[in-house]
Image (cartoon, rainbow, N blue to C red):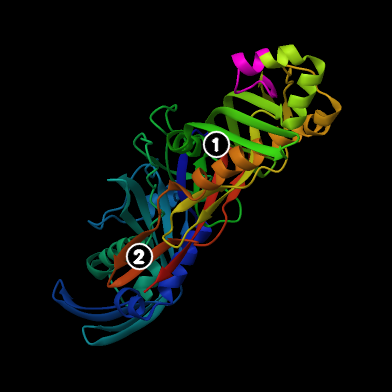
């Protein structure tokens, strides 16, 4: 089973789309897809032009043993044994036109050839190496090109052109995540369909691409496990204390409430495609007052002497009914939807929405008798506490601390081939999708300039 926290990749379709776009570039047409040679081979003057007539394609699988043994390496020698087992694939040229002269005699024709290459990871970048060329020798003989000419010109041309074409291929870079360190990345051709580079956090198990599952519908992609997002959130949001209060009513009868506690953490989760930020709040306590002139009158009527003693011994609270109490909430933790969006700089930012509903569980035990004058204030006390929790604690915290949190940096990358800049860019302004209950997925586009 595959194990990774971050993976970037390119499908076979994405590879072929990149080569098709390169084939449509006028600079590439003149510098890569059309090449002329004028040299002497064993005393024979050769002047030929080789032109690739259609976009090359890639098959992300090794050649058969038969084709491998019929192919030629850079020294013009047939390969032996089986193809290398590690990340070998095929570059297929379906139509190559040949025109020119050999010893002054015109030659022309068209054929196809295949280049077998290997991809590796060097300094966290893809590195391609064209290994050998397979060609139909009978076709070359019919065009008047001898084995010497093929070995001296055609095979080196095939290998060099393949390396040039393959250097145009890149995938998004594995981005940085604030405060998160990773293992060395690994590379793999998976399912004979994807070229993938993956890594895991240093706190995770070793990275593996066995039985790897790519995201659907994306030719160029990145997958990030929620564990990485939560590692960033753990560093960005933790242990925020709060102390908020409010008051309702007038001078005759009022209710006031105060809530203290700590926003402990925020973690991300996915369930059936729904993304939630789960907010955990600890050590919540409440304090309430029911007071006003009605309270003083009620206390005096019930016990004038006691009221006088209270006023002397406790001048700040003699005209109030008070309560201190603990608070729990449901659901715990609080699930609030979040989104991940790509900003104009290509960075991925997380923003949490607003809390809509919550159930608070508390039971104030008032310090005195609630008369009819305070009944209305007491009846509204629960709503008062809930209002503080939502409108003065949770939602303001979200607005202040949980908007546009930078989860990962721009994974875009650019390469240059023959003066052509090839850029893989994040799709800015888009909301990211999910894959199962574990991965956030980002898509990319390729452009040429």
Residue 165, disc: 2
In the figure, residue 86 lies in which quadrant? top left
The C terminus lies in which quarter of the figure?
bottom left
Which span of residues is magenta-colored? 309-323
Left-right relation of 8 to 328: left
The N terminus lies in which quarter of the figure?
top right
Is any part of residue 330 visible from this angle? no
Left-right relation of 375 to 34: right
Is any part of residue 339 visible from this angle? yes
Q: Relative to residue 234, is residue 168 depicted above or below?
A: below
Residue 313, disc: none
Crowding at dot 1, Cα within 10 Å, few <14 / some 14-19 / many 20+, comes out as: few
In the figure, residue 327 lies in which quadrant? top right
Q: Which residue is mark 1?
A: 211
Who's the residue at 42% across and 74% down the image? 23
Residue 288 position in % (x across, y down): 67, 26
Q: Secondary structure at mark 1?
A: loop
Who's the residue at 60% across and 13% down the image? 313
C-alpha span from label 2 to label 1: 29 Å
Residue 297 position in % (x across, y down): 77, 26
């Amino acid at each position: 089973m595959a194990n990774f926290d971050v993976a970037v990749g390119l499908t076979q379709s994405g590879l072929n789309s990149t080569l098709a776009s390169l084939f449509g570039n006028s600079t590439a047409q003149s510098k890569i897809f059309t090449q002329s040679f004028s040299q002497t081979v064993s005393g024979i003057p050769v002047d030929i032009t080789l032109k690739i007539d259609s976009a090359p394609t890639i098959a992300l699988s090794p050649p058969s043993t038969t084709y491998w043994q019929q192919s030629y390496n850079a020294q013009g020698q047939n390969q032996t044994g089986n193809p290398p087992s590690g990340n070998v694939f095929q570059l297929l040229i379906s139509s190559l036109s040949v025109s020119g002269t050999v010893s002054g005699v015109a030659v022309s024709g068209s054929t196809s050839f295949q280049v077998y290459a290997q991809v590796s990871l060097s300094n966290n970048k893809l590195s391609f190496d064209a290994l050998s060329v397979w060609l139909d020798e009978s076709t070359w003989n019919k065009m008047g090109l001898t084995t010497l000419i093929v070995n001296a010109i055609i095979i080196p041309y095939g290998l060099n052109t393949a390396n040039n074409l393959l250097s145009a291929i890149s995938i998004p870079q594995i981005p940085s995540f604030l405060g998160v360190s990773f293992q060395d990345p690994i590379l793999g051709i998976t399912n004979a369909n994807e070229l993938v580079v993956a890594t895991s956090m240093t706190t995770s198990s070793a990275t593996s691409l066995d039985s790897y599952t790519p995201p659907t519908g994306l030719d160029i992609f990145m997958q990030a496990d929620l564990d990485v997002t939560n590692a960033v959130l753990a560093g960005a949001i933790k242990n925020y204390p709060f102390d908020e209060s409010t008051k309702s009513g007038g001078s005759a009868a009022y209710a006031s409430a105060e809530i203290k506690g700590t926003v402990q953490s925020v973690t991300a989760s996915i369930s059936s495609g729904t993304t939630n930020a789960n907010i955990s709040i600890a050590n919540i306590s409440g304090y309430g007052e029911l007071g006003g002139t009605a309270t003083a009158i009620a206390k005096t009527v019930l016990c004038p002497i006691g009221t006088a003693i209270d006023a002397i011994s406790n001048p700040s609270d003699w005209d109030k009914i008070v309560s201190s109490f603990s608070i729990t909430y449901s659901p715990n933790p609080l699930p609030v939807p979040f989104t991940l969006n790509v900003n104009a700089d290509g960075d991925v930012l997380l923003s949490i929405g607003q809390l809509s509903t919550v159930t608070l569980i508390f039971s104030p035990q008032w310090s005195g008798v609630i008369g009819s004058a305070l009944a209305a204030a007491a009846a509204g006390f629960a709503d008062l506490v809930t209002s503080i929790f939502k409108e003065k604690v949770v939602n303001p915290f979200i607005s202040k601390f949980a908007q546009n949190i930078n989860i990962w940096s721009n994974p875009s990358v650019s390469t240059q081939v023959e003066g052509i800049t090839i850029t893989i860019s994040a799709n800015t302004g888009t909301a990211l999708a999910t894959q199962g209950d574990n991965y956030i997925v980002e898509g990319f586009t390729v452009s040429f300039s």
